[in-house]
């Protein structure tokens, strides 16, 4: 696990952008599922915005809080951004066609993943954001072996601008 202090929204978006190349490469071998954890307002959508910019998306990035799903067709991968906060029952994931999203070239970013219960696949990467001092703390944990090098690279490559790593385990 790598923990990174993020003093502001720009640092949170920068972390997302740093993750982009590694996630794009990983999803070419098979679908990648990322669970984004944290309380309301912790910066999950801001991190996704930075990630999408890092993947080449230039348009608007909408929070899927009300739509549950926002798709993004990008050159290196197809990104599906889900927000399960308003999900009343994990069975509702069946209506989203989750199984169809899990294919090579697919990157599935899930906010409030715990609401998906056992219908949601395990995370290849967990990104937990929480409040710390005046900023945020990001905890990055590989959930599958294929993303362990990405988490290790985060720990070794230095911090995004205006961030500092506070712990690596």
Image (spheres, rainbow, N blue to C red):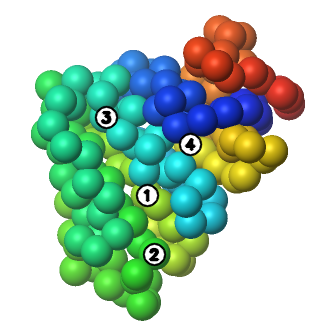
* Quarter assignment of residue 134: top right
Element type at marker 3?
helix
* Quarter assignment of residue 86: bottom left
Of tags 1 and 3, which is closer to the observer? 3
Of tags 3 and 4, which is closer to the observer? 3
Which residue position holds label 3?
52
Of tags 1 and 2, which is closer to the observer? 2
Where's residue 81, x and y in %?
A: 32, 54
In three-dimensional space, the C-alpha distance between marks 3 and 4, rounded to whole angstroms, equals: 16 Å
Q: In this orientation, which residue lies closer to the viewer: 73 or 27?
A: 73
Residue at figure coordinates x 21%, y 31% from the top left: 57
* CA neighbours of label 2 inside 10 A, class few (<14), some (14 to 19), many (20+): some
Which residue position holds label 4?
125
Where's residue 121, x and y in %?
A: 47, 61
Residue at figure coordinates x 44%, y 44% from the top left: 46
* CA neighbours of label 4 inside 10 A, class few (<14), some (14 to 19), many (20+): many
Kindly indicate whether the residue at mark 4 contacts the one at mark 2 (C-beta within 8 angstroms).
no
Q: Of the residues under marks 2 and 3, which one precedes in the sequence?
A: 3
Q: Of the residues under marks 1 and 3, which one precedes in the sequence?
A: 3
Residue at figure coordinates x 69%, y 43% from the top left: 136
Q: Of the residues under marks 3 and 4, which one precedes in the sequence?
A: 3
Of tags 2 and 4, which is closer to the observer? 2
In three-dimensional space, the C-alpha distance between marks 2 and 3, rounded to whole angstroms, equals: 21 Å
Which residue position holds label 2?
85
In three-dimensional space, the C-alpha distance between marks 1 and 3, rounded to whole angstroms, equals: 14 Å
Asked whether the viewer can see residue 56, the reply is yes
Which residue position holds label 1?
110
């Amino acid at each position: 696990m790598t923990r990174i202090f993020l003093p502001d929204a720009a640092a949170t978006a920068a972390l997302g952008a740093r993750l982009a190349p590694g996630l794009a490469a990983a999803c070419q071998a098979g679908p990648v599922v990322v669970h984004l954890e944290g309380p309301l307002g912790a910066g999950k959508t801001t991190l996704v915005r930075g990630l999408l910019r890092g993947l080449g998306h230039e348009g608007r990035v909408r929070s899927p809080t009300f739509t549950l799903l926002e798709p993004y067709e990008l050159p290196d991968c197809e990104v599906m951004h889900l927000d399960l906060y308003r999900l009343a029952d994990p069975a509702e994931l069946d209506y989203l066609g989750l199984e169809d999203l899990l294919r090579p070239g697919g990157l599935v970013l899930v906010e409030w993943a715990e609401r998906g219960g056992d219908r949601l696949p395990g995370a290849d990467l967990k990104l937990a954001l929480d409040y710390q001092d005046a900023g945020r703390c990001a905890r990055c944990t590989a959930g599958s072996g294929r993303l362990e090098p990405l988490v290790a690279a985060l720990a070794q490559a230095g911090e995004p601008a205006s961030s500092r790593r506070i712990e690596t385990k």
